[in-house]
Image: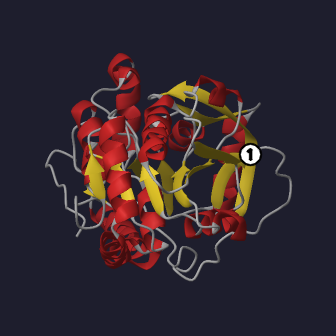
Amino acid sequence: MLIVTTRFGKETAAEPGVARIGRNILVPMNGALVNMTVGTGLGAKLRRILNSFGPDIVHTHCPLVPTLPLLSLRTLPPRSKVVGTFHAAADSNYAYRLLHSRLAPYADRLDARIAVSQPAMNLVHKYFPGSYAIIPNGIDLGRFTTSAEAIPRYRDGVFTILFVGRLDARKGLKYLIRAASLMAESSSKRIRLLIVGDDGARRLLLPRPGRNLEVVFAGMVSRESLVRHYASCDVFCSPATGQESFGIVLLEAMATGVPVVSTSIPGYLTLLKDGWNALVVPPRDPGALCAALRKIADDGQLRSRLADNGLQFVRRYAWDQVAGALERLYLDTIASRRTEPKPSFERERTPQWA
């Protein structure tokens, strides 16, 4: 297996099984800052890598997005089959709409199409109808575990709410700051909001927290430290307002044994059942968020029940389960190309993830 990706930050060390070309920049798209690869001669470099490796399957993510995903569809070795996974979810996509005639041939080049959730499939199917398998993102249950060691300074008796994510507007952090401030004003407990993610100038656009609320910006943390931050909180909260296709942070929290409070957006509702593995509230509603967080803080039995059910639920997203589904799709794709010159996407086939 070979992973082809870009360089992030100052990464220079060689990694076995990884080829890096170009460098990463962030561009605004779909209500967030997303990664894009830039550099000279990207297509030629990618073609040389693929021809040298000679893959049976090329699996590209966000296949209709520049630059590397689209380039992968232009530089495929003649005998390679290509699988594309679509991650975005929204009501509409202006790029798909405006550039449909140019993107359609690339979509037709895909031998198999995957969406990570029903909302993700709904978006891409609107512009590029066809057959999609729903195979979700996976989670490493050997890494995210209830045995993760907490960070001692956050286990000081202060009720700690954790947020993990970028400071994009759609992540809804401003609503969580207002909710946590309301909670701190009316609670006899000391309240802390622990924020893990980018810690740049965008934090200046966030509302000022209430004077009784302790806010900690941890910034970007390492892979090892991220697990420890989950283990250091009393509740995890994702107040996203929309355009989320899945919600991997929800599964990470569940796998670490942390109760979840989140919003009722379509991408999250594929994972959450209110009152069973999370408390779910409307988006953009600090009052509802505050009430849910207060309920978690005041009811130890509720915390335990949500955490236990979350641990039970997250097992179906273990990497061995997801990888097994991908492997079956790869083998089916190879077999279909042996008997057909091109797979047909005329019949709609959308298997559900169990």
Q: Is residue 167 above or below residue 269?
A: above
Q: Looking at this rendering, what residue extends furthest in the bottom direction?
A: 147
> Which of the 4 image quadrants contains residue 104?
top left
> Which of the 4 image quadrants contains residue 339?
bottom left
**Residue under label 1:** 8
Q: Is residue 284 above or below residue 18?
A: above
Image coords of residue 246 (percent x, y): 37, 51
Q: Nearer the viewer, residue 306 or 117?
A: 306
> Which of the 4 image quadrants contains residue 204?
top right
Element marked by disc 1: loop
Q: Is residue 107 above or below residue 1?
A: above
Image coords of residue 70 (percent x, y): 52, 37
Q: Looking at this rendering, what residue extends furthest in the left direction?
A: 347
Q: Is residue 171 above or below residue 314?
A: above
Q: Nearer the viewer, residue 341 or 22?
A: 22
What residue is rendered at 70% in x and 71% in y?
152
